[in-house]
């Protein structure tokens, strides 16, 4: 094939999982081929094979499909993070990078259940087409473009709502308290993407900030969130399930916490332009104790932030070992709106750790889907480095937490109730006030009606009060739907049931952000972070011995 896929320019600098990026100059791309055979001869073999396939294969195959697959497989032979992006994937990359998209301006809460999918509207973003058209919190989207969406994937729902600026989409809504479906036509417009959906005071004096990824506006969002949280004595920074994003944003986020001149991360590659050191340019704005939460899906740019704060003894790391993504990719724009990400460097934490986990001998699917089992190496083979305070830290397979706290896993009964969509349906029935009397006395019924008026104030979590009468309704609701349960299962899981009823009614009444605050109260990793805040303060203040000797930790995953 002709020089169709010559590199035109390097697009951007970012770090992400499964892809991470850094900018390099175009002049450094060409290099000598190690093999003695001229590269054009290899291209001749490829072109000849392509021509034979096109002319004689039993079915007609598009050239783009063959070429795209060949380039993708070629890059995957190098490492799991080098990749080829077709026009659709490349467009999505640009969208994610620039923190904007064209759509309606609603955040969606999708529930996937056996009978189909419920897509619930969270608060429409102010000034967006959805808000102007009157979409409300708690609306359920049932049809898009005249088609029912019960069996659509989340990506299908989102892709049908997105579209070019100025185009329109028809949707059908079910609204609590409105008997007939609502038909709405909305014109798409530019919508900003939010990377910090939650920033609130978890308990008096302790802030909680969730960063979902790093894109162009993340540092600005963090600054705005912190300005709203005044007088904090501690902060929980949640990087769980954060796949990464822009490198410059990871550096700016680190700037909030570290002292001026501190090393954040360094990169090393074959080219001079790929070897750099990134340091803090200004004194950190945040001078309070910090606990960082990570898990198996914390990757790349988020691992840079966690690694920098751990190496400089600036934050206590709690949770599970991170993904282990220490390779840096450059994004190149190719012809026909395609792109390529190529590994051009490795990155190292301030203590010199390479946290890339081993990918030799494993398939691409195993590498990405089994990060919780990595690394497979024994403890002795892992890198040992030291923080500023001479604490041991480890490389060679992600960031190892200072305090290992596994995520909570649902038991069989909890999983069964969730899979049957019990709480969503019961919550909406409660808010419609059409639940059967279930033998409730008039005085109890008055209390029940009062409890169904969601309340929200600064001193308590929003939502209904889950009374004994409501729990009786819940039991009857399970019976009516032929869901088997025992009284022992109800009693054993009573706290879970109450919390989920409260959450699902709160989603419709106040939005997913308020419901999130309810759910987080049962998150063992968040509770462990609260418990560890005094140790985080001691770590921040100490420049010598590690305070971790006094922390009761779960060290079974620690090398």
Image (cartoon, grey):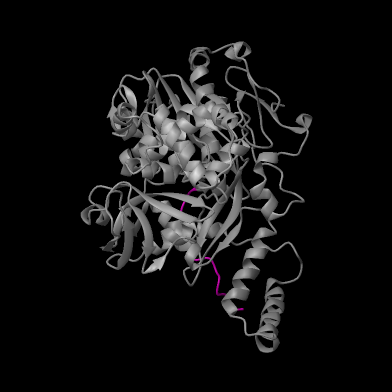
Percent coordinates x, y for residue 172 in the rendering: 33, 62
Q: Give the quarter of the figure containing the C terminus.
A: top right
**Which residue is at a point 30% across and 64% down the rendered structure image?**
165
Residue 440, quarter of picture: top left
**34 or 524, which lies in front?**
524
**1 or 472, which lies in front?**
472
Residue 59, quarter of picture: bottom right
**Which residue is at a point 61% across and 30% down the rendered structure image?**
406
Specify the principal SS of the magenta part. loop
Q: Is residue 273 above or below residue 322?
A: below
Percent coordinates x, y for residue 558 in the rendering: 69, 26
**Furthest residue toward bottom:** 55
- Region rendered in magenta: 1-14
> Does the magenta run of residues contain 4?
yes
Residue 525, quarter of picture: top right
Report whether 457 appears left or right of 417: left
Is residue 43 something one can see in this rendering?
yes
**477 or 351, which lies in front?**
477
Report whether 169 appears left or right of 336: left
Percent coordinates x, y for residue 109 in the rendering: 41, 48
Q: Is residue 160 above or below residue 438?
A: below
Is residue 262 something one can see in this rendering?
no
**Which residue is at a point 31% across and 21% down the rendered structure image?**
459
Q: Give the quarter of the figure containing the N terminus.
A: bottom right
């Amino acid at each position: 094939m002709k020089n169709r896929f010559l590199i035109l320019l390097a697009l951007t600098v970012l770090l992400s999982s499964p892809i991470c990026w850094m900018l390099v100059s175009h002049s450094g791309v060409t290099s000598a081929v190690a093999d003695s055979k001229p590269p054009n001869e290899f291209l001749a073999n490829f072109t000849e094979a392509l021509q034979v396939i096109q002319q004689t294969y039993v079915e007609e195959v598009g050239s783009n499909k063959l070429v795209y697959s060949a380039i993708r497989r070629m890059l995957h032979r190098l490492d799991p993070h080098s990749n080829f992006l077709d026009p659709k994937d490349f467009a999505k990359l640009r969208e994610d990078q620039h923190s904007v998209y064209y759509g309606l301006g609603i955040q969606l809460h999708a529930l996937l259940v056996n009978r189909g999918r419920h897509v619930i509207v969270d608060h429409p973003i102010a000034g967006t087409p959805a808000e102007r058209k009157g979409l409300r919190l708690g609306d359920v989207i049932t049809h898009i473009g005249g088609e029912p969406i019960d069996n659509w994937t989340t990506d299908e729902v989102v892709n049908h709502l997105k579209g070019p600026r100025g185009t329109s989409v028809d949707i059908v809504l079910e609204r609590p308290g409105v008997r007939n479906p609502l038909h709405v036509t909305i014109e798409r417009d530019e919508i900003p993407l939010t990377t910090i959906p939650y920033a609130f005071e978890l308990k008096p004096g302790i802030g909680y900030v969730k960063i979902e990824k790093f894109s162009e506006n993340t540092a600005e969002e963090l600054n705005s969130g912190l300005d709203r949280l005044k007088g904090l004595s501690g902060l929980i920074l949640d990087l769980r399930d954060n796949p990464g994003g822009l490198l410059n944003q990871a550096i700016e986020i680190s700037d909030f916490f570290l002292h001026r001149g501190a090393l954040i991360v360094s990169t090393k590659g074959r080219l001079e332009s790929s070897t750099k050191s990134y340091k803090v340019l200004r004194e950190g704005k945040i001078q309070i104790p910090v606990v960082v939460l990570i898990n198996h899906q914390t990757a790349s740019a988020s691992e840079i932030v966690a690694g920098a704060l751990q190496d400089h003894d600036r934050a206590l790391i709690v949770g599970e070992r991170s993904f282990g993504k220490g390779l840096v990719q450059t994004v190149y724009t190719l012809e026909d709106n395609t792109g390529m990400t190529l590994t051009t460097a490795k990155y190292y934490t301030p203590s010199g750790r390479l946290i890339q986990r081993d990918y030799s001998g494993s398939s691409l699917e195993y590498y990405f889907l089994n990060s919780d089992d990595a690394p497979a190496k024994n403890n002795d083979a892992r890198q040992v480095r030291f923080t500023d305070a001479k604490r041991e830290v480890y490389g060679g397979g992600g960031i190892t937490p200072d305090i290992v706290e596994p995520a909570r896993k649902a038991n069989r009964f909890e999983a069964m109730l969730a899979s049957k969509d019990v709480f969503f349906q019961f919550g909406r029935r409660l808010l419609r006030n059409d639940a059967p009397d279930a033998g409730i006395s008039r005085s109890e019924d008055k209390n029940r009606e009062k409890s169904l008026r969601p309340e929200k104030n600064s001193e308590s979590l929003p939502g209904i009060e889950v009374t004994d009468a409501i729990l009786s309704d819940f039991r009857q609701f399970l019976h009516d739907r032929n869901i088997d349960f025992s009284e022992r299962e109800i009693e054993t899981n009573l706290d879970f049931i109450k919390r989920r009823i409260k959450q699902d009614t709160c989603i419709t009444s106040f939005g997913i952000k308020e419901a999130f605050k309810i759910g987080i109260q049962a998150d063992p990793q968040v509770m462990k972070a609260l418990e560890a805040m005094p140790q985080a303060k001691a770590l921040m203040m100490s420049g010598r011995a590690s305070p971790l000797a006094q922390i009761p930790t779960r060290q079974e995953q620690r090398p």
